[in-house]
Image (cartoon, rainbow, N blue to C red):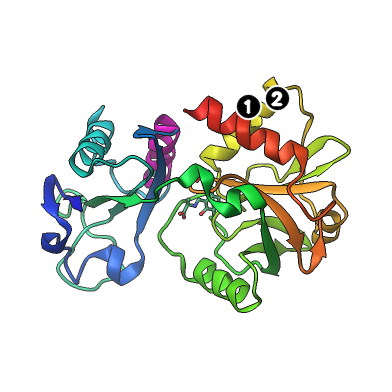
C-alpha cells in the first residue's frame, strides 16, 4: 500500500511515527473510517465534520486546510486503485519528544497525521451484512465521552473478544440497564413498525451512518423513536440491526442467545440496508 504520513505519500514499509508520539504513549488521538464502495467515498462530508468536532473537543488544532482532507482521500484511492474497502485516518497530538501528561505547546508540537486504505473486496456482499449477526451484551466500561472518536479502543477490543469466545459476532454495551451502542456501531430495534434507537448524547458515538439512516427512514415514512432500550426489549423486538461505516446496515438476529423475531434478518432492516446503499452511492 501507499500510505500518507504528515504530508508525504510513502510505501507502508517506509512510513514511521515516533515512539514518543502521544497517540502511541497516551492514546491521545482521534480517528475516522470512511467507507469506499465502487471507488466512491461514502458520506465523506459527515466524517470530515465529525473529525473537526472530535479534534475540537480534545483541543487539537485541525491540521487540514479547506479541501485538503478530501484531496488526500482521493489521492490515496487513486494511488492504491481502491475499489471496495475504506480509508482509515488518525490524528494524534504529535510527538513532544518525551513522555509527559501535560499537553505540549501546540505552537511547537504539530499533530501527527496518518491515513491508509483498507481493502475489502465485495464489501456489499458480505455474508454478515446479508444474513445478519448474533450479539451478546457486556457491561459498558468505556469512559464517559464516547461522542469523541478517540483511538482508545482497548475495551471495545476486549468486548469483541468476549463475543468471539462466546461464539458470536459482536457485543452490545449495557449501562444502567440500557444499551448504549455496539462495540463499533450504533444499535436499533424495530417494534410495531417503528425504529427505536438511543438519542445522541456523550454516552455514544454520533454515527455518520446513523444520521444518514434516520434521514432515509424518515423519507421512507418509517416511524423513528429516539429513546434508550433494554436487552429484554431487544429480545422481544420484531427486528434489530446496527449501523457503521464498515457494516452499513447489518441485521442482528440474536441477542444473548434469544432469537429476535423469526431469527432471520427482518424486512425493515433489509429494506433500510438497500435504501442506505442506494442513497449513499
Ligand atoms: N466504528 N459507535 C462506535 C463505538 C463506533 O466505533 C462506530 C464506528 C460507530 C458508527 O459510526 P459511523 O456510522 O460513523 O461509522 C458507532 C468504526 C467504523 C470503526 O471503529 O472501525
Residues under numbered marks 2 and 1 in contact, where contact means CB atoms less than 8 Å apart: yes
Residue 139, image x and y in percent? 68, 70
The stretch drawn in magenta includes residue 30 = no
Q: Please give the residue where the numbered disc 2 appears in the rendered image.
A: 218
State the image quarter where residue 81 is shown. top left
- In whole angstroms, how far apart are the C-alphas of marks 2 and 1? 5 Å
Q: Nearer the viewer, residue 11 or 119?
A: 119
* Up/down of 17 relative to 147, above or below: below
Residue depicted at x 22% and y 58%: 94
Q: Secondary structure at mark 1?
A: helix
Q: Please give the residue where the numbered disc 1 appears in the rendered image.
A: 215
State the image quarter where residue 235 is shown. bottom right
Q: Which residues are magenta?
A: 43-55
Q: Nearer the viewer, residue 41 or 126?
A: 126
Numbered circles on residues, count? 2
Q: Secondary structure at mark 2?
A: helix
Residue depicted at x 77% and y 28%: 222
* Up/down of 260 relative to 72, above or below: below
Dot 1 surroundings within 10 Å: few (below 14), some, or many (20 or more)?
some
* Up/down of 121 relative to 275, above or below: below
- Residue 245 is at least partly visible in this image: no
Locate residue 89 relative to residue 242 in the image: left or right: left
Q: Identify the main secondary structure in magenta.
A: helix
Residue 25, image x and y in percent? 29, 71
Residue depicted at x 57% and y 53%: 127
Residue 203, image x and y in percent? 62, 53
Whether the residue carrying mark 1 lies under 8 Å from ligand 1 is answered with no
* Up/down of 145 relative to 57, above or below: below
Residue 266, image x and y in percent? 77, 44
Amino acid at each position: 500500500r501507499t500510505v500518507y504520513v504528515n504530508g508525504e505519500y510513502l510505501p507502508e514499509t517506509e512510513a514511521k511515527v515516533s515512539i514518543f508520539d502521544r497517540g502511541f504513549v497516551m492514546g491521545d488521538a482521534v480517528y475516522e473510517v470512511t467507507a469506499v464502495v465502487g471507488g466512491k467515498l461514502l458520506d465523506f462530508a459527515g466524517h470530515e465534520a465529525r473529525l473537526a468536532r472530535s479534534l475540537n473537543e480534545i483541543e487539537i488544532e485541525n491540521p487540514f486546510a479547506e479541501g485538503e482532507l478530501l484531496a488526500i482521500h482521493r489521492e490515496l484511492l487513486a494511488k492504491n486503485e481502491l475499489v471496495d474497502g475504506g480509508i482509515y485516518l488518525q490524528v494524534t497530538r504529535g510527538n513532544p519528544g518525551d513522555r509527559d501528561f501535560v499537553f505540549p505547546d501546540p505552537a511547537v508540537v504539530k499533530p501527527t497525521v496518518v491515513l491508509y486504505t483498507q481493502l475489502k473486496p465485495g464489501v456489499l456482499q458480505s455474508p454478515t451484512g446479508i444474513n445478519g449477526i448474533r450479539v451478546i451484551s457486556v457491561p459498558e466500561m468505556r469512559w464517559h465521552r464516547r461522542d469523541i472518536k478517540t483511538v482508545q479502543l482497548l475495551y471495545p477490543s476486549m468486548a469483541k473478544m468476549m463475543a468471539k469466545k462466546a461464539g458470536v459476532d459482536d457485543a452490545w454495551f449495557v449501562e444502567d440497564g440500557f444499551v448504549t451502542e455496539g462495540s463499533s456501531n450504533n444499535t436499533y430495534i424495530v417494534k410495531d413498525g417503528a425504529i427505536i434507537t438511543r438519542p445522541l448524547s456523550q454516552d455514544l458515538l454520533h454515527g455518520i451512518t446513523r444520521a444518514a439512516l434516520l434521514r432515509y427512514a424518515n423519507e421512507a415514512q418509517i416511524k423513528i423513536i429516539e429513546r434508550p432500550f433494554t436487552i429484554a426489549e431487544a429480545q422481544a423486538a420484531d427486528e434489530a440491526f446496527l449501523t457503521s461505516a464498515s457494516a452499513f446496515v447489518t441485521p442482528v438476529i440474536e441477542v444473548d442467545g434469544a432469537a429476535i423475531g423469526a431469527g432471520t434478518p427482518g424486512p425493515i432492516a433489509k429494506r433500510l440496508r438497500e435504501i442506505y446503499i442506494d442513497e449513499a452511492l
